[in-house]
Amino acid sequence: MTFVLKGAVSALAISCGLAVMNAAPAHAYTLMDMLRGDRQRTQSTIFMDQTPGRPVPRDAAGGSLGGLDPEAPLPKVSGPRYYTYKTETLQFVDTSKFADPVVTGAVADVSPGGDAGQEPVVQRRFLAQAKVRANADVAKALEAYYGDSRNPLIWVEGNQINERAKTAMAALADAASVGLDPADYALQTPDIDPTNPDPAARDRALTQFELDLSAKVLAFIQDTVRGRIDPNKISGYHDFQRKVVNLAPVLKLVRMSPDVGAYIASRSPDSPQFEALKAELAKLRAADGGNEEQIVISLQGLLKPGDSSPEVANIVKAIQKHGSETLRTDHAATLAAYAGSSDYSPDIVALVEGFQKERGLKSDGVIGQATVRAMTGGDTNASKIDKLIVALEQVRWLPEDLGSRYVMINQPAYMAYYHNDGKEQLSMRVVVGGKNNQTYFFNDQIETVEFNPFWGVPQSIIINEMLPKLRSDPNYLDQLGYEVEVNGHAVASSSVDWYGSTDSVSVRQPPSSDNALGELKILFPNSHAIYMHDTPSKSFFKRDMRALSHGCVRLANPRAMAAAVLGTTVDDVAKQIASGQNHAVKVPQKIPVYVSYFTAWPNKDGVVEYFDDVYGRDAYVEKAFDATTKARGAQI
């Protein structure tokens, strides 16, 4: 039998499941209800026939539905996918109305009675012949400015470009300092020969330059405010409302600005995070790391105490280079006595454990890729620069002001941070979605904390993970204590025909000590059914690589986070849990939450830290950069 999955179900393929969002009893509403839209929706109910053998589907009146194939393959629900980036459409600017006369320079009065000292009036007839391509917003701003005969030319005076134009071009050439590509805004100055007897050729070149530079300035300002690529075109895991940049006043502002370079620079974000990333980028570009020896540790799998590996020599060498002075002092005897042996001996294990501890890794002496990365200094200078460029772009996708109170979840860092009064007040380890169940990149608002939650099992888990067990043992969910409903009616797991469509079937786990959501969950309602929650699987937080969930964010210290967002104490949260009753409490004021993805991000002290690209998303951003620059540089 063919399984029909609704669009909403497919979109939530990797989600955790979402239960009640308010103080109403949790049994009144589950994720499956949300997907269906109505608990009482009329659909066929699938029940077991009481006769021996394979179950027969029945409709609500008890009639057989038939048509089942007992050999039908197990269905699968797939998550979002990554796309081949499609650049924005560039259109020709409508220059047909640009031929009216105008005064050059910043002359405001162009009326017939203007001062005799004004610069001479020139014809803009060649503007109408210029060919410029731009996106719709930039084209609209160009047409509005140059279509108004009262607006003078900005970059051209007399027979040459002015100083304002040179200053603007210098500012655009510095685009790399804020993570943009100067090639996107590069422009050649017109080659004007003052002895050329053909003034038409000169004016044609100057007016083409005028429009080209205005288009580049507008594009830069739009890019530096909102980002040069559309994140929603990268993958289905990106979910942002792209910013709208008001370009209408820009050309008048650059014309009137006493320092056009300062104005252009002022349009970049100025948040502390952006400034820290920008400063780090400048520092790395200025550093001469080309001659620095790179220590390579070629380790396959794990190196455990008692093992032997030729890489032990490089491990010791790396710790000597990147370990702290205190660590080197504490293990000076070990370092002095090491003679290049390949044995991973107890004294070297103790050295590694000390290094792991000071780097915030699990200090068990087991060397995996996270420890290797820390030992070798992490990324190369070039790869750090690449991560910073991606991070600067991604900052632009978020609100310019994150707020004085917010929660930041950084998936590559496997960390969550609570900020209040502009300062980090709480941080903790988190578990995020595995590579096949990735956590989305988006921002929302925290609204509710639910205590002793029910877990509404999403269709993705029912189909991908539970269904194979249920086909061999229909009592599977009954034995585990799960609650099953078909079309809103409670039924036994064994009464459902698990060879039919599960679209009308909802499954949930009651509150308990082994509930998948643990003691509480923190809700920020979103279309991906992602939230923060507790977990009974505490051992996961001890791992360095913590991309292990079905997509939601598991908190190492959920009580502390719940107390922070509710503005209460951990003791009060403990009392709410101790009641044993499922209930939800609204936060006093909605709090922004940024479920983010930064492989480079400043810590609370402003020091930029680097993380592994667990989902490989940076590469897709970089491909989008390349596609954008190529499209913009295409010849007309």
Image (cartoon, helix red, strand yellow):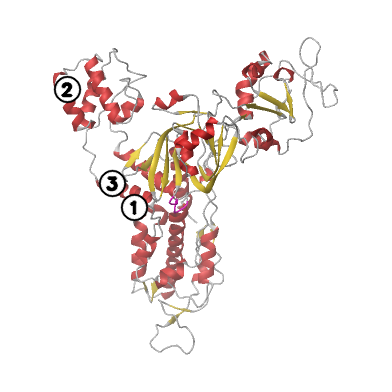
Tell whether 617 sits left or right of 179: right
Going from the N terminus, do you reach mark 2 or mark 3 first?
3
Other-residue count near label 3 (Cα within 10 Å), few / some / many at <14 / 14–19 / ≥20 = some
Q: Are marks 3 and 1 in contact (CB under 8 Å)?
A: no
Q: Amino acid at mark 1?
A: Ser
Q: Which residues are magenta?
A: 399-404
Q: Which residue is drawn at the image coordinates 62% and 40% (left, top)?
A: 23
> Residue 462: percent from the left, percent from the top?
63, 25
Q: Nearer the viewer, residue 146 or 327?
A: 327
Tell whether 345 sits left or right of 415: left
Q: Amino acid at mark 3?
A: Arg
Quickly name the residue at label 2: 335
Quickly name the residue at label 3: 285
Quickly name the residue at label 1: 177
Other-residue count near label 2 (Cα within 10 Å), few / some / many at <14 / 14–19 / ≥20 = some
Residue 477, picture quadrant:
top right
Residue 585 badge: none
Q: Which residue is drawn at the image coordinates 49% and 36% (left, top)?
A: 573
Question: What type of secondary structure mainly makes up the magenta span?
Answer: loop
